Image: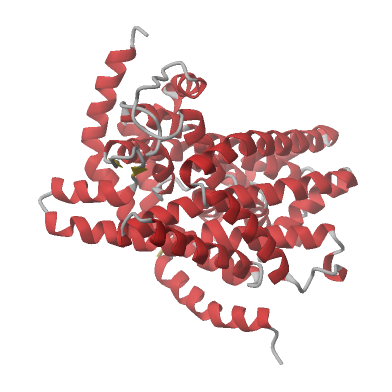
Amino acid sequence: MATIDETINNFITPYAEALDTFIFYAISVGGVDIPLIVIWLTVAALFFTFYLGFINIRGFRHAIRLVKGDFTKEEDKGEISHFQALTTALSGTVGIGNIGGVAIVISIGGPGACFWLAVAGFLGMSTKFVECIAGVKYRQISEDGSVSGGPMYYLEDSMKKIGLPFLAKPMGYFYAIAIVIGCLGIGNMFQSNQAFEQFVYVTGGTESYFADKGWLFGIVIALVVASVIIGGIKGIARVTSKMVPFMGILYLVSGLLIIALNADKLPAVLTSIFTEAFAPTSVKGGMIGVMLLGIKRAVFSNEAGIGSASIAHAAVKTNEPVTEGFVALLEPFIDTVVICSVTALVILVTVYDPAAASDGVQGISLTASAFEQTASWTVYPLAVVAILFAFSTLVSWSYYGLKGWTYIFGENLFSTRIFQAIFCCFVALGCMVQLDAVLKFSDAMVFLVALPNVLALFILAPSIKADLKTYLQKIENV
């Protein structure tokens, strides 16, 4: 007789597979199947990088100044500071994918995929810049000072700009529905599932008392999440502004320690990353195949082109929408270029074995093994970091989903509490569903919302570029 976990997994799997097939419809180029959605997001990142004159490089210093509060004005409208907006959005991207997702892509694509993951993160900085400016520019501020913003709102304006006002609300609803469903996957079930896997790993693996009690772990996590999200964006920002720096620094210090202890292997690893990026030996499709693996995982990690982060950034205290674009471009850099790269190096200098690379669905356990091999005690801080990563992502994505929900059903306390209850139920559910179904469901949902979001960004690009030019003229002597 099937267990509850198996029954739930068997029920979700066919739907996840059908959705995955639809979203990742691919065309064959040179013997390699290229998902059209990956092309869509890559073209967008390249376009915005060149269209805005490599803003991801020349805007970096100004972004740091904004986060430090150099241009802060208390009288500006909004609910949270630039730093809080950054940490809230980062908490939604810096998650289990930075640990388990990188392990998966290395298992499948080898060292070369790490190079393309970092490149995609660099290019994604420009996409994030554009979407977060739009999030602030088209946000709505209620009489009590609360803010609602994100793709739902700038999609409306983009449709009006191209003379299709009758599509304004339908496009907004499409995104809202997708983000509500998507938040239950990428920002919820995937995170709680991998956090539970790590918890089981450090408490005895398959022999652990908790190995078959995902429901218990899920309920505990759900209750903790509920205690935070009930306070809205201000409550979430207060938590993330303290948690994100702590967990980020703890993870980076731990990772750099492992790398330092294996420094003798680093030159060979760095050589293999660049060599395998352009001439992979074991990946189907060669260079194109490994490139796609890296790009796909980078988007899943930093969400550039998804539009979700613009929902958090819309709540920032500023009267200059362009400022939040600068702040937002730091996200893919921190999330993908820095944290994901550290994870990759830890794995490559310790446990990576090209001969053992398989389908790659090893997730966070592979990263845990990489830490444990060098210093057995590091598996415990990694477990703490993994659960914090998952928790921070959960609370941020609850807000993203909530704003999609209230766009559809209206801003009121009753509606808000219904969504929060549903979200917390899915936290527990995620711990009872196997990795394959959760991963497919999450990937499909996150890419689905990119379709309308990137379309809107292309339409709004000229006005955002004009806003950027005006803003730079204002601050050139500051």
Based on the displayed image, in which of its 4 quarters is residue 108 positioned?
bottom right
Based on the displayed image, in which of its 4 quarters is residue 196 positioned?
bottom right
Which of the pair 453/230 is nearer the observer? Answer: 230
Picture quarter with the C terminus = top left
State the image coordinates of residue 104 (x, y, percent, origin top left).
65, 57
Image: 141 above or below 280: above
Which of the pair 377/356 is nearer the observer? Answer: 377
Q: Is residue 230 visible?
A: yes
Residue situated furthest left in the rendering: 163
Left or right relative to 159: residue 263: right
Residue at point 40%, 56% (across, down): 413
In the rendered view, how is the structure colored?
secondary structure
Based on the displayed image, in which of its 4 quarters is residue 346 positioned?
top right
State the image coordinates of residue 237 (x, y, percent, origin top left).
52, 39
Image: 267 above or below 223: above
Left or right relative to 344: residue 225: left
Picture quarter with the N terminus = bottom right
Residue at point 51%, 33% (across, down): 84
Q: Give the number of callouts.
A: 0
Residue at point 61%, 52% (across, down): 97
State the image coordinates of residue 107 (x, y, percent, origin top left).
68, 57
State the image coordinates of residue 60 (x, y, percent, origin top left).
47, 24
Residue situated furthest top in the rendering: 477
Q: Is residue 38 visible?
A: no
Residue at point 73%, 40% (across, down): 269
Image: 284 above or below 334: below
